Amino acid sequence: MGLLDNVKKNLGFGGKGADERSGAAPFDRTAERQAAEDAAAVEVSAADKAAAETAAAQASQQQAAADAAAAQEAEQEGLEPEAPEVQPQAQEAASEAAAGTGQPGPVAPRVTEVVVEQGDTMSGIAAQYGVDLGALIATNADTVPNPDRIYPGQVLRLP
């Protein structure tokens, strides 16, 4: 038996027992499993996106309430709402409004893209930004065909 015959046999393309196997070769089951994992990652990504949208809506409501409170306070004191001395009051009002809703304080802007630096890995980036690795891979599947090979300068989108 030659080298090619051994390779075919190991891959399930020929040799003894090839006719006895039902269905696809072993690597086809791996592809099915990978497709299921990818689908699960997309579902997680969609859930993360919905949670982020809800948090953004809450932050927007908090900011609107804080702006209204600052404008009202400025009006009572006879100041212009955009005056520099009103801005600290607006921040304080935002903190108070956030405390009333159970939020820890004004919400910082969310990072949506990351530039890969020397030594970065997908798992390291996922851990650094607190996102699920599978969701990160799924979000960047169109620009990063092999998640084990990312390069400095690449831009990754965060889920």
Image: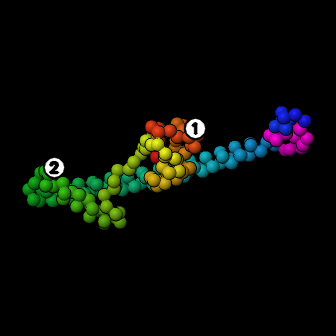
Q: Which residues are magenta?
A: 9-22
Tell whether position 153 is magenta.
Answer: no
Q: Quadrant of residue 88?
A: bottom left
Q: Report the residue marked by disc 2.
A: 82
Relative to 131, is 65 on the left or the right?
Answer: left
Q: Is residue 50 visible?
A: no
Foreground mark, 2 or 1?
A: 1
* Residue depicted at 49% across the width and 45% down the height: 119
| Labels 2 and 1: the sequence-earlier one | 2
Label of residue 155 in the image: none
Label of residue 145 in the image: 1
Give percent across and percent down for residue 64. 27, 54
Give percent across and percent down for residue 6. 85, 38
> Relative to residue 24, is residue 124 depicted above or below?
below
* Residue depicted at 65% across the width and 45% down the height: 35
**Looking at this rendering, what residue extends furthest in the left direction?**
78
* Residue depicted at 82% across the width and 41% down the height: 10
